Amino acid sequence: MLIAGIILLLNLALLPALDRRRYSPNRVKCAANLRAIGFACIMYANADRQGRYPDTFKTLMVTEGITPEVFCCPTSDDQPAKSADQLSAGGHLSYIYLEGGLTKKLAGEGHSGFEGDSSFVIAFEPLKNHHGGGMNVVFADGRVQWLEAEQGKKLQAVAQSAGGKLVRWNGTAATVAATQP
């Protein structure tokens, strides 16, 4: 009985570590999804005459040929869309797109890539995707960063109150930026 109790206690102590390890590959896959979305946004802006980022994920899927699976976080219950029209429907989209008028000019793209302000947030995921432990965020230069839960809550609150304006993340806090002139 004593040995069974010790084994049970060891199992309970080890479960959180095993659980974290199980979700790590999903976090990496999720970051890869957002990186693909970020680079597709940049390619779209490069092809656009005014250098605008796409208005919606639907536009991005149609014009840049991204597969529906990319729009679903592997830790969410979302299922890939069967068409671009389904991306706005519930259960087919894991990421929140901030399409508030971002352009290459605002993002500070120079001749050799992004040399200016790459702090603009393109998209992020709700905290629920990774069981409340944090979120992946993709920025105007295509870079993806993991934010711990407390930082994610700050970003999510500012993004929800932005009212269609651009959002910046400076590494510790989110701010609402001016819309495109």
Image (cartoon, rainbow, N blue to C red):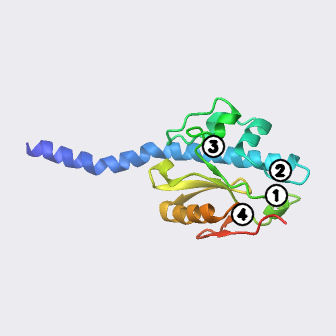
Q: Look at the image and tell me in which quarter the N terminus lies.
A: top left
- C-alpha distance separating marks 2 and 3: 19 Å
Q: Which amino acid does label 4 sit on?
A: Lys
Please identify the residue farthest to the right as the structure is shown: 49
Give the quadrant of residue 84. top right
Give the residue displayed 56% in from the left and 64% down from the top: 157
- C-alpha distance separating marks 4 and 3: 24 Å
- Residue 139 pos. (x, y %): 69, 57
Q: What residue type is labelled 2?
A: Ala
Give the number of the mark in front: 4 or 3: 4
User: Which residue is the site of mark 2?
Assistant: 45
- C-alpha distance separating marks 1 and 2: 7 Å
- C-alpha distance separating marks 2 and 4: 18 Å
User: Which residue is the site of mark 3?
Assistant: 33
76 vs 123, left or right, is left
Pointer 4 or 3: first along the chain: 3
**Answer yes or no: do the residues labelled 1 and 2 have beta carbons within 8 Å?**
yes
Disc 3 element: helix
Give the number of the mark in front: 1 or 3: 1
Pointer 2 or 3: first along the chain: 3
Give the quadrant of residue 112. bottom right
**Viewer-proximal residue among 91 and 23:** 91
Q: Which amino acid does label 3 sit on?
A: Asn
Give the residue displayed 73% in from the left and 46% down from the top: 56
- Residue 177 pos. (x, y %): 72, 69
Disc 4 element: loop
Pointer 1 or 4: first along the chain: 1
User: Which residue is the site of mark 1?
Assistant: 103
